[in-house]
Image: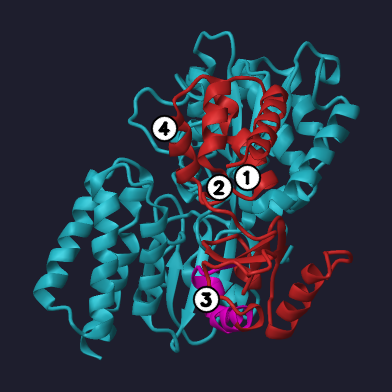
Chain colours: A red, B cyan
Amino acid sequence: MFECQRNEIQQEVNTIVRKYGRTRNYLLPILQELNRKFSYINNYMIEAVSNALDISPAEVHGVVTFYSFLNETPKGKYIIRLCKTISCDMAGKDRIVRVLEKELGISFGETTKDGLFSLEYTNCIGMCSEGPAMLVNEEVYSKLCPEKVVDILEFYKNGARKRA
Amino acid sequence: MKNSKKRILFGEYIVGSGLAAALKLKPKEVVNEVKKSELRGRGGAGFPTGLKWESAAVQKADQKFIICNADEGEPGTFKDRLLLMEHPGKILEGMAIAGYAIGAHHGIIYLRGEYVYLKKGIEERIDHMKATNLLGDKILGKRFNFDVEIRLGAGAYVCGEEFALIESLNGRRGEPRNKPPFPTEKGYLDKPTVVQNVETLCYVPYIIANGAEWFRTHGTMKSTGTKLFSISGDVENPGVYEVELGITVRELLEMVGAKDTKAVQVGGASGICVSEKDFDKPIAFEGLPPGGSIIVFNHSRKMLHVLENFMEFFVEESCGQCTPCREGNYRLLEGVRLLKKGDCTVAYLRDLMELARVMQISSKCGLGQMSPNPFISIIENFKDEILYS
């Protein structure tokens, strides 16, 4: 890793830790902010956080690996999380899987080459009466159909300027 | 609101009336009123709310905490999302009343990461309540301070378990721990902590404003009050319904327009799957699991596919800390896949059923103890379809 990248990370960690205080109980919010900023949490960030809070890097790593919304590898700018639990499954999740994979040219678990989209499955997101449903970063979309999915993708490709 | 017969949560309420009534009482009287109402936790486990408050109230500590468990992750459940979106004021009022009752001045809403889009609305409600003196310092002119903070989860079903939730707030992996000590003795930051489900907190202002007796006129002898049901699957009108506990599966199905029903999953993935012969059983603390998640399957659905979906869920969501849950769910899922291919012998299926029962008694937390429920109930209730078709 380049020194300038290390400096950027260190600065970011300092800012975030100053905001929450150097106490263990704010470890998760600290990691969540890093994750939002860099799209993932690498070993250098883990080390910086563990130094700041004075806890073992192994402990921090353990927390990072536990939560499915904290990423260990870089992700796209927009993470699409499609619900695969039973109600959404019965409402036609498979059709949405095919549309997403075809339109983006990637499989689930992958990120597009331009770094714009990552495709992931998630468990129940509480939209069971309005399935199939998915999250794009922090937004929720329900009652999906192929046309609607394409509109949503277009919206984000155009820089998310106006609401789909 | 789908229910035509409006009951409690979906009925009339004057903002602040519960909190105002509570602050006129002594904290002990508030606890007693909740105890008398026989309100039980609406997250699924059904622990008596009043008892929980009492055990936290008697603790001597410099700090105590009220936590609202908004980590609604049970498959098929979405009632808390609706409450967080449309009734955040009742939740916050319930938290403040609980805080007054046990002597806590700080509340935390643990909001699941999947619901982050609800955060802004709740924050606005907190600000509004501070501006109208229902939260913050010297609430309604009395000597009682209470503030609320929102913390986000990060995609872990097990954090709905109260100890896993507390561990997560403490900055650790969301792993349940052995009890005792209970959270009311040693919870968040090792201080006495009361963790309540979103829906449970919503009933509290009504109970204090209208009295325990009034609350007990709803529901059955052992399951007082109403309950929100999240209904999805093969029904005409899915959604959130408020009904009295003690309702039968058949009555629920009629209410939402379910036709050609083969099976109903009662209580979410960790609940049980019933067939037609059990449709007249009541859903209550003394009956079928009252978690509130109802998923309906019609005759076109294959029960092995349903079961595979549930077992995949538990394999992914097990925290991996104890062996029965971590390995057991993996083996059960493998067994379901063998059954699907037609490669599972009856003798091996019997072994798996025994494994499932071992998991029920030897897992550390509720997740592990409940995770074999769909396996056992679907295999038992749909044996003909699974083994002989």
Which chain does tag 2 point to?
A
Cα–Cα span, label 3 and label 2: 25 Å
x, y (%) of residue B223?
Answer: 49, 47
Residue type, numbered disc 2: Leu
Residue type, numbered disc 1: Asn
Q: Are marks 3 and 2 on the same chain?
A: yes
Q: Quadrant of the C terminus of chain A?
A: bottom right
Circle nearer the N terminus (2, 1): 1
Q: From the image, tell me which residue sits under label 2.
A: A70
Q: Quadrant of the N terminus of chain A?
A: top right
Circle nearer the N terminus (4, 2): 4
Residue type, numbered disc 4: Ala
Is label 3 in contact with label 1 (beta carbons under 8 Å)?
A: no
Q: Quick check: can you spot residue B32?
A: no
Cα–Cα span, label 2 and label 1: 6 Å
**Would you identify the image quadrant in which residue B206 lies?**
top right
Circle nearer the N terminus (4, 3): 4
The secondary structure that most of the magenta stretch takes on is helix
Count of number-bearing discs? 4
Query: Is residue A60 placed above or below B86 in the rendered structure?
Result: above
Which chain does tag 1 point to?
A
Q: Which mark is residue A35?
A: 1
Question: Is disc 4 placed on a helix, strand or loop?
Answer: helix
Cα–Cα span, label 4 and label 3: 37 Å
Stretch of the chain drawn in magenta = A82-101
Q: Which mark is residue A89?
A: 3
Residue type, numbered disc 3: Asp
Task: Kindly report which numbered mark, 4 or 3, lies closer to the viewer in this rendering.
Answer: 4
Q: Are marks 4 and 3 on the same chain?
A: yes
Question: Is disc 1 placed on a helix, strand or loop?
Answer: helix
